[in-house]
Amino acid sequence: MPKQMETTSRSAELEPSGSQAVKALLRLREMVLAGELAGGSRIAEVAIADKLGVSRTPIRAALMRLEQEGLLELLPTGGYTVRTFTERDISEAIELRGTLEGLSARLASEHGVASVLVSEAQACLDQIDAVLAQPALDDEAFSAYVRLNEQFHALLSEMAGSAVIAKELERVARLPFASPSGFVVVQANSGSARDMLVVAQDQHRQVLEAIVRREGSRAEAIMREHSRLAQRNLRAAVAGHQHETVPGIQLIRKREPRPRA
């Protein structure tokens, strides 16, 4: 074994197993979303372990986790392939998120929300307002919006007080296309970018107001409508072939698979 490889191997063995597992998971997810592992390709476990400089045990754990997240598919004969998606798959995932967030908003309205959470949500929206007050949005502004948008949606989930719904929201949002900010980057090069985000922000304000006023049906309807903005961005991303700007978009199949005879 070459000296450099031997050193790398020993260093990996000295790392805590948990650290190796996290490293493998994050890097593998990045490789899938960046297209380093092509859609439909079989994962070479040994080659991946060598590339990342970790043992096969954390690689196996990472593969199992990514299969649970929906990015990989377990083969009947063993092993994994990189999963691909149709536009319909993604649309349904976004619809599912909208349904879950709508339910979450309704439960928050019906049960009532602690004032501290309402204050945090209002402060978050104030920060988004400050971002959108800029006459033009640069990359830094979009990054700030994405961060704050994800924070607000997380607060909405927390308001429901349901561990079951929170877990399901977390699961569906792990898909590269279904998170609250999954397609926001598509708007970065659009002339109407700021206008679209202003609409989304208005819906944020409305749902928070409905929750505070204990208007459950209204809060649920707003969040379902809110997810339709992501549906619009999905269509724009697919039509625009923006493979370099949207993580994981290369996993979208152009056509539905033909049924087997």
Image: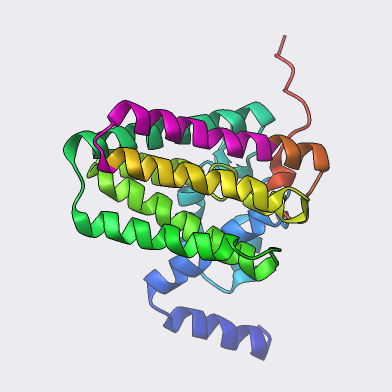
Q: In this view, does 78 lie to the left or right of 172?
A: right
Q: In this view, does 251 lie to the left or right of 211?
A: right
Residue at 66% over, 88% down: 4
Residue at 66% over, 62% down: 47
Quarter of the picture containing the C terminus is: top right
Q: Is residue 247 visible?
A: no
Classify 36 as above or below 197. below
Residue 213: within the magenta? yes
Classify 141 as above or below 8. above
Q: Residue furthest top?
A: 261
Classify 21 as above or below 36. below
Q: Give the range drawn in magenta.
A: 212-234
- From the top left corner, tell me how far across and down residue 78 is, in percent: 55, 40
Residue 219: within the magenta? yes
Mostly what secondary structure, the magenta segment?
A: helix
Quarter of the picture containing the N terminus is: bottom right
Residue at 51% over, 84% down: 10
Q: Is residue 213 visible?
A: yes
Residue at 58% over, 74% down: 53
Q: Which of 101 and 60 is in front in this view?
A: 101
Classify 75 as above or below 31. above
Residue 18 figure quarter: bottom left
